[in-house]
Structures are given as C-alpha cells and as structure tokens.
Image (cartoon, rainbow, N blue to C red):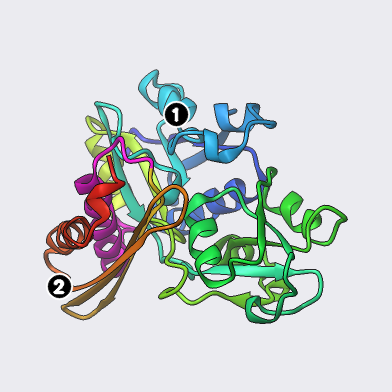
Amino acid sequence: MNDLRKIRVGSRASPLALVQTEEVLALLRPRFPDVEFDVVHVSTQGDRKKDAPLSTLDRGTFVKDIEKALLDSDIDFAVHSAKDLAPDLPTGLKVLPVGDRQDARDVLVTKSGLPLSQLPSGTRLGTSSPRRTVQIKAIRPDIELLPIRGNLGTRLEKAVGSDYNGVVVAAAGLARLGRLSEATEFLSIEQVTPDIGQGTLVAEFREDNTELKAILSEIVFDATAQAFRAERAFLDTLGGGCTAPVAAYATINGKKLNILAMAAAQDGKQIVRAEIKGDSQNPEEAGRSAAHRLQESGASEFIR
C-alpha cells in the first residue's frame, strides 16, 4: 500500500455530499496517515437538471457521472448516500458500506411546529419521493404532497416559505448537517418505512483495485454492512426496472436480523407491507424473503 500516497475521492459538491465525504475521510485518515486524500467535485446529471421533478429521474441519476469518472480513472473512489445507488452497478465497479449508519427515519419539518396527526386539512408538504408520498397519504389523505427540488438546505428554507407548510426529509441528512433540532417529528418506520440504504454511506471503487478495497474494508462495520446487504438484496429481487414506490429497512441485533418492507402502487391505492426475521449472517436471504413475501401478498400486480 505504500504506492498509494495520494487517493482521489469523488463527491458531489452539495454541502451534504461534502459532509458525507468528510465523514468517511475522518475514519480513514487516522488509519492511513501516509495517504493523502484529495476530494474531487463531480457534477452529476441530477444536479444539472435542477428543474426536473425528482420523481422523473431514475434511481442512480445522482451517481452516474461519478461512476463514469471512476471508470475513466479520473478518481479512485467515491462516496455516495446508499439510497442514491442504482439497483445495478456498472460492470467493473463495487461498493462497500462504510462507517456507522445514521438514523434512517424520515422526519417532518413544519412551519407551525405541529406533528403529522395535528396538521390542518389541506396542509402543503414538500417531498419529491413517491415512497414518502404514498405512505403519508395513507395516514393523512387530506394533506397535499407537493414536489420540491433543491439541496437539503434549500428545502428547509422552502419549509418556512410561502409555497409550503413543511417538508419531509431524511433524519440522517439533518443530523449530518447539524440541523436535527429543526425536526418537528420523527416518522414511524412502521408507517413510513425508509428508503433502501437510507442513512448509510457507501464507497464505490473499481473492482480491480484490490489495494483500495483493503483500505476501505477497514471502515466497514458489521451491523451497517449486514443491513445494507439485506436491503439491496430486497431491491435486487424486485428487479432493476422496478418503478413502483418500494422501501426496506433492516435492523441487526447480534445474530438476529429484522427487515420491514413496503411496496405500493404508483397511485398509492394499494400498499403491501411485510416483516421478515432472519439471520444476520445471511442478510441476503432475509432481503429476498421480504421481496417474495410482498409479491405473494399482492405487490406483483403493480411491480413490473
């Protein structure tokens, strides 16, 4: 590893993306003091299409350009939010979940400070996530869910503006930006199940770079990795072309693994949920079982 004196780390240039990258580097630097980590900003298609509704962008839109930079050897590895990964990685690339998972729940940030149950009928909440929309509509069908764009800071500003009465965002993002105190309410994972990999960071690299893999493996923690593998197996079993709102959240307790999963029709009129208990030493089996349970319970009718 002595020849790896400088490692180029790809990251989006948004404040949250840079904080996430620094979180990973803060784990690596003390372990590898002889390595210089240089952060390289990469503009992504998702960043450039500022006016496009997020619901029209494919999962992976915020990482594809970074993956191209990896394949072109312009960078050595990249840090992503795990939920931004496409279901299928490009040939030649691998990912490792790194560090500890942050709180995976979604949070409500409202101008009034009222929780979801007490919001007036007709309240306007900003979210561009179909997954959040269908689950919140199931709880409060009288609330209006509106598309919203911008980085996390911009969305929080819009939450107290004139167009919205609040927003729904990831707790992990607020925590990483030091703004968790702005959350009005943490939403129940049973009612609003988190996105696949939400709160988890991943490092993506070229699979032939075995030395870099050895470096990154030093900051892979078992519980985070096992949950990530279960959730990704769930998504993989449903198929890379799945466009229906889906969610999965795995928790680890020693050798026990528990995974909550959800799939919904695009219009939100059908929501199917499942809970699977499995072995943390075989997380992929639990993820696949959760996907099969949903399909057997009716999700196969709207998951294509």
Q: Quadrant of residue 160?
A: bottom right
Percent across and percent down for residue 298 are: 23, 57
Query: Is residue 26 visible in the rendered structure shown here?
Result: yes
Q: Is residue 260 left or right of residue 99?
A: left
Identified at 28% across, 60% down, the residue is 225
The correct choice, above or below, for 239 with respect to 164 in the image is above
Residue wearing tag 1: 64
Q: Main secondary structure of the magenta part?
A: helix
Q: Quadrant of residue 208?
A: top left
Q: Is residue 36 left or right of residue 265?
A: right
Q: In front of the other: label 1 or label 2?
A: 2
The residue nearer to you, when weighing 272 against 241, is: 272
For the residues marked 1 and 2, what is the alpha-carbon distance in whole angstroms?
Answer: 33 Å
Does 300 appear in magenta?
A: no
The residue nearer to you, when weighing 202 against 76, is: 202
Identified at 47% across, 50% down, the residue is 267
Q: Which residues are magenta?
A: 218-243
Q: Residue furthest top?
A: 72
Residue wearing tag 2: 278
Does 231 appear in magenta?
A: yes
